[in-house]
Amino acid sequence: GAGVSQSPSNKVTEKGKDVELRCDPISGHTALYWYRQSLGQGLEFLIYFQGNSAPDKSGLPSDRFSAERTGGSVSTLTIQRTQQEDSAVYLCASSLSRAENTGELFFGEGSRLTVL
Amino acid sequence: GIQVEQSPPDLILQEGANSTLRCNFSDSVNNLQWFHQNPWGQLINLFYIPSGTKQNGRLSATTVATERYSLLYISSSQTTDSGVYFCAVLPYPHNRKLIWGLGTSLAVNP
């Protein structure tokens, strides 16, 4: 697509429920990132996918968080048993991988998650 | 690890004023980007500028990689320039994760 697409744009859920957030990167971009941004805060790195390599999961805050990327394109971030502190905007970004891996990053509009 | 510091943390301007935002980084980088996060939360690419100078309308940016800093210039500011400006770097040698500054929060008053 023309840009990074995320869905849903807004999600309100009850504490304890599972949620899935989707990211469709720019066509041809092999690198995909998930970030989280709490109100008034900077970006917190969650996970990074690069082609067929093992993802870098070092930013996932707990084992309730997981992400997958199917077919090297669309990615889903899953949060199980949501807690109120999970409330944030979840941002997805993609970049065109180059040999030197200095690709410019492009962001989607984010998914705003509210856990009641 | 590499540190990224942005200054000033907050800035209030009158419409029409010019400003300079600064990003210092503590080590060599492969990549540096400036982003604008508007009041609705959308992150917008401004510049991909690991070195040199680029201009886009009223905005321009300069990165002096050897001295480990980058500057973002905003001229003739408008209320739509309000938001948070982030600098993010990709450390050298190869590293997958962008390191982000804490941002400069800009408010442009009419």
Image (cartoon, coloured by chain):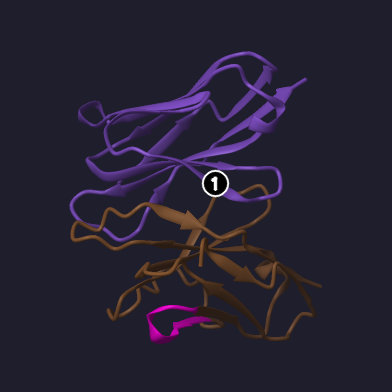
Chain colours: A brown, B purple
B22 relative to A21 in the view: left or right? left
The reply, left or right, for residue B100 in relation to residue A53 is right
How many discs appear? 1
What kind of element bears circle 1? strand
Name the image quarter holding the C terminus of chain B.
Answer: top right
Residue B84 against residue A29 in the figure, above or below: above
Q: Position of residue A69 (x, y in %)?
A: 44, 82
Indicate whether residue A67 is drawn in magenta.
yes
Question: Which residue range is magenta in the image?
Answer: A66-74
* Residue A73 among magenta residues: yes
Query: In which quarter of the view is residue A22 placed?
Result: bottom right
Q: Residue visible at 29% across and 37% down?
A: B26
Which residue does the image show at 49% across and 80% down from the upper left? A67
Q: Is residue B71 visible?
A: no
Horizontally, residue B27 falls left or right of residue B15, namely left
Quadrant of res B62: top left
Task: Return the residue at label 1.
Answer: B44
- Other-residue count near label 1 (Cα within 10 Å), few / some / many at <14 / 14–19 / ≥20: some
Task: Inspect the image, locate mark 1, and give the three-letter code of the amino acid beneath it.
Answer: Ile
B96 left or right of A112 in image: left
Question: Up-down: is A53 above or below B72?
Answer: below
Residue A1 coordinates in the image, percent (x, y): 51, 67
Which chain does the residue under circle 1 lie in?
Answer: B
Q: Nearer the viewer, residue B105 or A29?
A: A29
Which residue is farthest front?
Answer: A2
Residue drawn at x 22%, y 40% is B28
Residue B91, image x, y percentages: 27, 49
**Residue A67 visible in the picture:** yes
Q: In the displayed structure, would residue A2 be above or below residue B73?
A: below
Where is residue A4? Give x, y as percent: 52, 64
